[in-house]
Image (cartoon, rainbow, N blue to C red):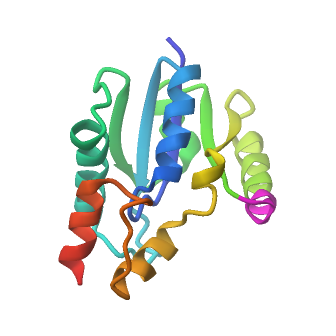
């Protein structure tokens, strides 16, 4: 069974993330969606809220199968997470060329830490490439319509924040 880890902040999960998840499920038997609980970052939603939004978005709003996806939090190296879950790959989403330099360096460092783990870059579909959690939060904060960017549950959670 081939397993991959898709790490990120998912603050909140967007349709761009979901495109990457769909594509990953076409390649791997199991996908670990790992949301970061790094205390050095300033998150909009708590770790429990982000896990709740991911679970409700994927399994209730979009009816994904729970047999292929596991949602967890983590606060250690992604390489260690891969080892723990016997994952052979790290999935990283790319939106624009500007993402590539950072992601390229991160993939190189992960490869140095564990040469057995591959990093795969996947792009969301064209209509979702511009979506970022940061912009979604800003639009929501200013009262804009975010229905095209996140699931119904994520919309509800964002509206509750304001």
For this view, does 42 lie left or right of residue 55? right
| Region rendered in magenta | 96-102
- Write the residue at 44% across / 56% down: 14
Residue 34 screen position, x and y as percent: 42, 46
Residue 17 screen position, x and y as percent: 50, 49
The quarter holding residue 155 reads bottom left
Residue 138 screen position, x and y as percent: 44, 82
Residue 61 screen position, x and y as percent: 25, 43
For this view, does 13 lie left or right of residue 47? right
- Write the residue at 75% across / 50% down: 109
For this view, does 37 lie left or right of residue 53? right
Which residue lies most toward the top here?
1
Q: Is residue 100 magenta?
A: yes
- Write the residue at 69% across / 37% down: 119
Q: Is residue 67 above or below residue 31?
A: above
Q: Decide whether the magenta segment is chiefly helix, strand or loop.
A: helix
- Write the residue at 38% across / 58% down: 150
Q: Using the image as rendered, state which of residue 22 and residue 44 is in the foreground.
A: 22
Q: Is residue 8 above or below residue 91?
A: below
| Quadrant in which the C terminus appears | bottom left
């Amino acid at each position: 069974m081939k397993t991959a880890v898709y790490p990120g902040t998912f603050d909140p999960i967007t349709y761009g993330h979901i495109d990457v998840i769909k594509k990953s499920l076409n390649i791997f038997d199991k996908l670990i969606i790992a949301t970061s609980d790094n205390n050095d970052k300033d998150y909009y939603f708590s770790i429990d809220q982000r896990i709740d939004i991911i679970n409700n978005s994927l399994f209730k709003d979009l009816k994904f199968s729970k047999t292929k996806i596991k949602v967890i939090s983590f606060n250690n190296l992604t390489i260690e997470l891969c080892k723990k879950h016997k994952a052979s790959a790290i999935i990283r989403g790319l939106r624009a060329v500007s993402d590539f330099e950072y992601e390229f360096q991160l993939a190189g460092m992960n490869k140095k830490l564990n040469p057995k783990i591959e990093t795969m870059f996947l792009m969301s579909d064209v209509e979702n490439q511009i979506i970022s959690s940061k912009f979604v939060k800003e639009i929501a904060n200013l009262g804009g319509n975010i229905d095209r960017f996140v699931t119904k549950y994520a919309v509800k959670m964002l509206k509750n924040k304001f």
